[in-house]
C-alpha cells in the first residue's frame, strides 16, 4: 500500500513539473483569483477558451504580440496592465470581469493612437500597431503640449484630448515663420527645426526653453500681442570654432542624415568639420554621377580647311618631303582638379540644412557591400550607439549585427538589410537609440571570484554565457579599477614587455591605459622562461592591476574580441 502511494506521489510530481516547464515564463499564481478572473499562470486551451479570446483581443489592439495560445504568461500580464492603464482601470495585470467587459467593447488600440498622433503632427512614420519607444515618446510629447501628466501611456484623459483636438502644429509653424523663428513652409509636422524654433521663441520671451509647445507657450505664441521677432545676430562665419543654435541645427541634420558621428551640442569642432566636408563631397559626387549619366551634347564645330603652304626650296637645297599619313602628336588632356570641400556653411547651405529635402534613401545596402551608402549607414548606427568602431565603408559582420539590433529595437524585420523601410527610420529623428554597442562578445571581470565571464551576442543582447576564465586581478595594494570601458584592443604582437617590472607576457589586450588582459608571466620572450608562480596564483589577486590569464585564455580574447569590445570590472 505504501509503495502504491509513493508511486502515485512521484507521478503527480512529474506531471506538475511538466506543466511548469510548458509555461516557463509564467509561475503558478500564489494568490486566489476572483471568480471569472484570469492571471499569470492561468491556462485554458479549450475550443472556446476565454483566455484565447482575451489574447486575441489584446493582439487586435496592438498590445500583445505573438499567438493566442491560452497560456496567461508574463507577456499577457504586461499587455493587460497596459490596457488597464489606457482605459483607466487599476493596473493589476489580472483580467477580472470588469477588465474583460471593457476589453470586449474597446475599439481604440495602438494603431488608432499612432494614426491620430501622426495626424496631429507629433509623430512621423507609419502606424504599425506596435507599442514601442517612438510611440511612447510621441504620447509623452502630446501630454506635455496639452498640460497632461506625462506617462507615455494613452490613458482616458490623453485619449479624450487626442481624439478631439485638431492639428495645431501648422498654426504654430505659421506663427513662428511670421516671427522669423522658422523658415520654409509650414507642413504640420513637429520636427527638429520646429522644436528649435519653439525653443528660441521661449528663450526670447523668458519661458522655460523646452522646445515643446506647452499650454503656456501656445497661449503666448498664438494669442499674445507685442511678440518679439527673432533677434538678428551679427553674422559670423560658420566654421570650426563657431557655436550657437545655427550650428546645433546643422549638426542635427548631419547626424540624422548619416554624416556626423559625434555630439549635437552647438559647438563646431573637428567632428562637425569632417561631417560638413563629407556632406559636401557626397553631394558633389552625386551631382557628378548625375551629369555623367545625363550628359549635355556639345555641338561639333565644322573645321575650316587649312591651306597647304607652298614649299620654298633655297638654291642648292634638297626639298623636304612631308609624309601626310603621319598623325599629329595630340596635346595631353589636363587632369581635372580634385574637389576639395571647405568647412564653411554659408547662408544658402544653412537654409538647406534647416528646410531642405534630402533624399535619405539612395540604394539598399547589405552584407558584403562597400561605398558611400554603407558609410552613411555605419555613421548613423554609430551616432545612435549601435556601432562603435566607426565607418569604414565596408558592410561586415559588426555592421550586420548592429543593423539587426537597430531593426529589433525599432520594430522592423531583423533581416540585416538596409532597405528603404529601414533607412527611412534609421535616417530620422524618431530612430530609437541603442543601450549598448554591438560586438560578438562582452567580457565581465568579477574581482570577488577571480573569473572572467564571456557572454555572446544573441541578436537582442549579451544573453549567452559561453566561457569562464580563471584570472588574477590586482592586489588590494594595486586594485583593478571598477567600471565599464570600450577596450582599446590588441596591444601589439604576441609578446609584450613590461618595462617597469622587467618581465614579459603573451597576447596583451589593452582595456584602457595600463590595464590589460595578458597571459601568465615570463622572464624573457621565450616559452621556456615561464614564471610558474604566476600560474599558481591564477584564481587569486596577484597582479598590479592587469587581468592575468592562462595563455590559451589570453589568446582567445586577443584573437576574438575586436577593439571597442565592452569590458566591465565588478566586485
Image (spheres, rainbow, N blue to C red):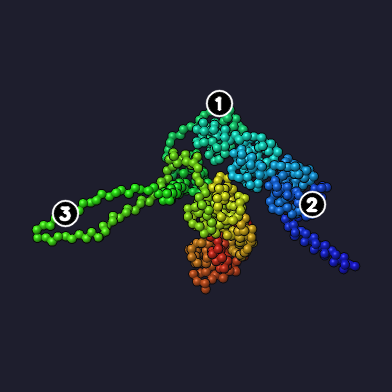
Residue at image x 62%, y 34%?
Answer: 166
Q: Is disc 1 in contact with disc 2, using a CB cutoff of under 8 Å?
A: no
Label 3 element class:
loop
Q: Residues within 10 Å of mark 2 (few under 14, many from 20)?
A: few
Tell which circle, 2 or 3, labels the residue nearer the N-terminal end: 2
Q: Secondary structure at mark 1?
A: loop
Q: Nearer the viewer, residue 497 or 212?
A: 212
Mark 1, residue position: 225
For disc 1, the neighbor class at 10 Å (few under 14, some 14 to 19, many from 20) is few
Q: Position of residue 289 (x, y in %)?
A: 43, 50
Q: Which corner quadrant holds the C terminus?
A: bottom right
How far is mark 1 from mark 3, CA to CA? 91 Å
Position in image of residue 545 (x %, y %): 56, 60
Q: Is residue 11 above or below residue 116?
A: below
Q: Quadrant of the N terminus?
A: bottom right
Toward the right, the furthest residue is 1
In the rendered image, which residue does mark 3 sit on? 310
> Rounded to the nearest whole Å, what is the CA distance between mark 1 and mark 2?
64 Å
Q: What residue is shown with label 2?
A: 48
Residues at marks 2 and 3 touching, judged by CB atoms closer than 8 Å: no
Amino acid at each position: 500500500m505504501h509503495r502504491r502511494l509513493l508511486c502515485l506521489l512521484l507521478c503527480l510530481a512529474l506531471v506538475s513539473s511538466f506543466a511548469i516547464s510548458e509555461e516557463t515564463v509564467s509561475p503558478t499564481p500564489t494568490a486566489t483569483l476572483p471568480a471569472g478572473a484570469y492571471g499569470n499562470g492561468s491556462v485554458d486551451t479549450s475550443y472556446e477558451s476565454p483566455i484565447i479570446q482575451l489574447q486575441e483581443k489584446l493582439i487586435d489592439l496592438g498590445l500583445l504580440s505573438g499567438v493566442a495560445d491560452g497560456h496567461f504568461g508574463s507577456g499577457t500580464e504586461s499587455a493587460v496592465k497596459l490596457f488597464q492603464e489606457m482605459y483607466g482601470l487599476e493596473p493589476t495585470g489580472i483580467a477580472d470581469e470588469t477588465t474583460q467587459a471593457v476589453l470586449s467593447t474597446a475599439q481604440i488600440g495602438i494603431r488608432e493612437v499612432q494614426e491620430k498622433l501622426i495626424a496631429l503632427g507629433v509623430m512621423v512614420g507609419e502606424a504599425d500597431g506596435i507599442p514601442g519607444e517612438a510611440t511612447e515618446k510621441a504620447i509623452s510629447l502630446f501630454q506635455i503640449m496639452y498640460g497632461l501628466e506625462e506617462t507615455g501611456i494613452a490613458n482616458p484623459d490623453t485619449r479624450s484630448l487626442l481624439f478631439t483636438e485638431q492639428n495645431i502644429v501648422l498654426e504654430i509653424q505659421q506663427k513662428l515663420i511670421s516671427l522669423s523663428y522658422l523658415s520654409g513652409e509650414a507642413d504640420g509636422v513637429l520636427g527638429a527645426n520646429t522644436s528649435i524654433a519653439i525653443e528660441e521663441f521661449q528663450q526670447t520671451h523668458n519661458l522655460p526653453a523646452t522646445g515643446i509647445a506647452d499650454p503656456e507657450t501656445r497661449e503666448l505664441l498664438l494669442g499674445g500681442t507685442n511678440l518679439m521677432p527673432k533677434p538678428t545676430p551679427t553674422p559670423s562665419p560658420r566654421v570650426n570654432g563657431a557655436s550657437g543654435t545655427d550650428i546645433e541645427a546643422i549638426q542635427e541634420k548631419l547626424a540624422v542624415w548619416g554624416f556626423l558621428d559625434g555630439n549635437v551640442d552647438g559647438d563646431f569642432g573637428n567632428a562637425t568639420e569632417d561631417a560638413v566636408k563629407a556632406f559636401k563631397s557626397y553631394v558633389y559626387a552625386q551631382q557628378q554621377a548625375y551629369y555623367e549619366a545625363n550628359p549635355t551634347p556639345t555641338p561639333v564645330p565644322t573645321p575650316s580647311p587649312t591651306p597647304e603652304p607652298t614649299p620654298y626650296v633655297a638654291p642648292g637645297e634638297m626639298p623636304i618631303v612631308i609624309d601626310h599619313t603621319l598623325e599629329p602628336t595630340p596635346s595631353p588632356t589636363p587632369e581635372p582638379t580634385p574637389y576639395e570641400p571647405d568647412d564653411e556653411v554659408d547662408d544658402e547651405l544653412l537654409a538647406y540644412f534647416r528646410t531642405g529635402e534630402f533624399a535619405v534613401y539612395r540604394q539598399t545596402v547589405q552584407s558584403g557591400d562597400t561605398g558611400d551608402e554603407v558609410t552613411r549607414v555605419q555613421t548613423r548606427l554609430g551616432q545612435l550607439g549601435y556601432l562603435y568602431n566607426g565607418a569604414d565603408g565596408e558592410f561586415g559582420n559588426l555592421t550586420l549585427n548592429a543593423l539587426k539590433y537597430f531593426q529589433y529595437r525599432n520594430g522592423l524585420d531583423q533581416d540585416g538589410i538596409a532597405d528603404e523601410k529601414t533607412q527611412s527610420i534609421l535616417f530620422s529623428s524618431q530612430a530609437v537609440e541603442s543601450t549598448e554597442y554591438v560586438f560578438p562578445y562582452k567580457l565581465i571581470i568579477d574581482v570577488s571570484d577571480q573569473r572572467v565571464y564571456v557572454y555572446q551576442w544573441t541578436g537582442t543582447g549579451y544573453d549567452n554565457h559561453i566561457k569562464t576564465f580563471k584570472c588574477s586581478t590586482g592586489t588590494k595594494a594595486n586594485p583593478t579599477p571598477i567600471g565599464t570601458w570600450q577596450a582599446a584592443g590588441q596591444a601589439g604582437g604576441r609578446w609584450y614587455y613590461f618595462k617597469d617590472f622587467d618581465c614579459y607576457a603573451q597576447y596583451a589586450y589593452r582595456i584602457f591605459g595600463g590595464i590589460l588582459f595578458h597571459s601568465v608571466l615570463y622572464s624573457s620572450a621565450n616559452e621556456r622562461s615561464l614564471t610558474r608562480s604566476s600560474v599558481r596564483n591564477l584564481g587569486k589577486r596577484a597582479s598590479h592591476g592587469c587581468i592575468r590569464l592562462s595563455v590559451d585564455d589570453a589568446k582567445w580574447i586577443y584573437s576574438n574580441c575586436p577593439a571597442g569590445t565592452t569590458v566591465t570590472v565588478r566586485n
